[in-house]
Image (spheres, rainbow, N blue to C red):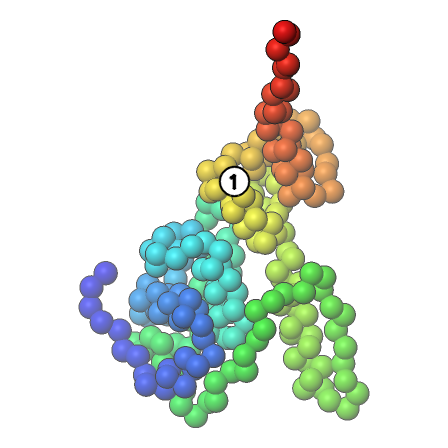
Amino acid sequence: MKGYIPLRRGLLDHLKIMSFSELKVYIGLLLLANYKNGYVKITVARLADTLGTDYKNTLNSIHRLDKLGYVKYTPAKNQWQDSQFKITKFNKGDIGSVNNTQPPPEAVPEAVPEAPPQAKVVNGSKGKGLRKTQKLKEVKRSYKKVKYLEFVYLTDKEHLKLVEKFGEAGAKAHIETLNNYVGSHGKKYASHYYTILSWASKDKPEPQKKIKANL
């Protein structure tokens, strides 16, 4: 890629709520975006490799930028397809433009609760109720399972943990093993993530027992 992209100075007002990692991912997406429509199609792993960042921090930064409204992140249906990113602060021919009349969006906590909270609507305040409903939808989306191959389903968080534990190639191999088994035997499991962990622990070689020498 060659050439330049214009950035409005109004972006400076938004940097105070971005971490260094989030800023690096955002600028990387700006540089990769189609200048006509602001779209980027790329896998998270390839984006991390392009930016020189690790997979986990890159994915966390993507989710936070999505919550803050800087990008719209559409995860891939499986690990071999590209994810889609839409630069929301975008005008045709002016990538990364930020409206100076708009205040920076309110910071969103990075931590995601273990279980989706129940949405509560405050009486007499439709605005607060709407915001809580939107946050609930965002949290539920993080628990949505993505299809890998034909039969394996994992959430983004579960897949990330497998990559951290076994590496990209190892996670892919375990997913393929489970997919082939489910496809050939028609088995059903409550959790494909914990099934992979269970099988992986059984595959580990048992430590050799110490044999005492006979004197």
Image quarter for residue 96? bottom left
Instruction: In the displayed orientation, state which residue is furthest to the left.
Output: 3
Looking at the figure, which quarter contains the C terminus? top right
Residue 22 image position (x, y, % from top left): 43, 69
Q: Is residue 83 above or below residue 215?
A: below
- Residue at image coords 33%, 63%: 32
The foreground one among 67 and 3 is 67
SS class, disc 1: helix
- Residue at image coords 42%, 66%: 21
Q: Is residue 169 above or below residue 4?
A: above
The foreground one among 206 and 165 is 206
Q: Is residue 51 above or below residue 104?
A: above
Instruction: In the displayed orientation, state which residue is furthest to the top.
Output: 215
The foreground one among 15 and 9 is 15
Q: Is residue 151 above or below residue 48?
A: above
Looking at the figure, which quarter contains the N terminus? bottom left
Image quarter for residue 98? bottom left
- Residue at image coords 71%, 64%: 116
Q: Is residue 176 left or right of residue 98?
A: right
Observer able to see residue 192: no
Instruction: In the displayed orientation, state which residue is furthest to the right.
Output: 123
Residue 61 image position (x, y, % from top left): 48, 65
- Residue at image coords 35%, 65%: 28
Image quarter for residue 48? bottom left
Name the residue beneath numbered marker 1.
166
Residue 207 image position (x, y, % from top left): 61, 25
